[in-house]
Image: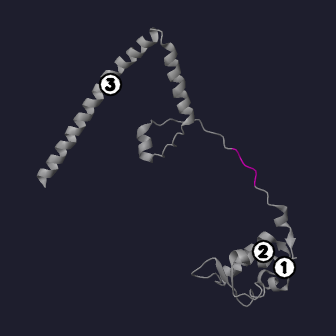
């Protein structure tokens, strides 16, 4: 086991050395390439260099850049030094106004008034009261939470059905409102 570990460490070190050597070689070539480009431009081949630049610019425009991955907090902290940004002023949003159609009081009929009360109330409050009744009496199906089991008071509201989905419920309740 110890021999394997040592051998592994050796290979890792060798690879690191090779990588460093490659990088050095590339770095040594770079300035030469730049000098060669300068010479070609001086010799009267400036047009070709300009063409190459235009092509590169086109490629940049047409190719889609991948969105950068969000770095973890630690990595982000390592990458860039902390800078204090000027405090931005937060815009206060105006409170969202409720739709007047929802706020218009509606009168529940006799069947629905046993569940939510006989006073006229907005549709939003009607739905809230209906849900509080359903949750208080544990009428939501335990396996399929979208289904509501009707009890004696809710059965006439649900047109005699014993089980109704919550989406169907709103449709049925709207028929019992004036």
Query: Percent position (x, y) of residue 131?
Result: 70, 76
Residue 124 appearing in the image: yes
Tag 2 and tag 1, C-beta contact below 8 Å = yes
* Front-most of residues 99 and 53: 53
> Looking at the image, which residue is at 58% across and 82% down?
142
- How crowded is the residue under tag 2: few (<14 C-alpha within 10 Å), some, or many (20+)? many
Residue 43 falls within the magenta-colored stretch = no
Circle number at residue 126: 2
Secondary structure that dominates the magenta span:
loop
Relative to 24, residue 77 above or below: below
Q: Position of residue 124 (x, y in %)?
A: 77, 69
Q: Is residue 93 magenta?
A: yes
Instruction: Answer left or right for 11 relative to 107.
Output: left
Q: What's the magenta region?
A: 91-95
What element does badge 2 sit on? helix
Earlier sequence position, callout 2 versus callout 1: 1
Please tell me which of labels 2 and 3 falls first in the chain: 3
Frontmost of labels 3 and 1 is: 3
Q: What secondary structure is found at the residue carrying circle 1?
A: loop
Which of the image's four quarters has the N terminus? Answer: bottom left
Q: Which residue is mark 1?
A: 108
* Mark 3 or mark 1: whose residue is earlier in sequence: 3
In the image, 75 versus 48, the foreground residue is 48
Horizontally, is 128 left or right of 67 in the view?
A: right
Q: Quadrant of residue 119?
A: bottom right
Bin the neighbour count of mark 1 within 10 Å (Cα to Cα): few under 14, some 14-19, many 20 and up. many
Residue at position x 72%, y 87% from top? 161
How far apart marks 2 and 3 lie (CA) works out to: 74 Å
């Amino acid at each position: 086991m110890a021999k394997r570990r040592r051998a592994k460490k050796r290979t890792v070190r060798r690879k690191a050395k090779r990588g460093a050597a490659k990088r050095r070689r590339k770095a040594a070539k770079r300035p030469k390439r730049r000098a060669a480009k300068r010479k070609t431009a001086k010799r009267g081949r400036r047009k070709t260099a300009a063409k190459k630049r235009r092509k590169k610019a086109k490629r940049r425009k047409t190719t889609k850049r991948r969105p950068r991955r969000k770095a973890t907090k630690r990595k982000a902290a390592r990458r860039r030094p902390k800078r204090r940004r000027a405090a931005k002023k937060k815009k206060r949003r105006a409170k969202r106004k409720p739709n007047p159609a929802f706020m218009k009081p509606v009168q529940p009929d006799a069947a629905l008034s046993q569940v939510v009360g006989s006073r006229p109330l907005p549709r939003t409050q009607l739905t809230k009261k209906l849900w509080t009744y359903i949750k208080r009496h544990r009428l939501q199906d335990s396996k399929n939470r979208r289904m509501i089991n009707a009890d004696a008071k809710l059965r006439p509201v649900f047109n005699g059905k014993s089980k109704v989905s919550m989406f169907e419920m709103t449709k049925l309740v709207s028929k019992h409102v004036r």
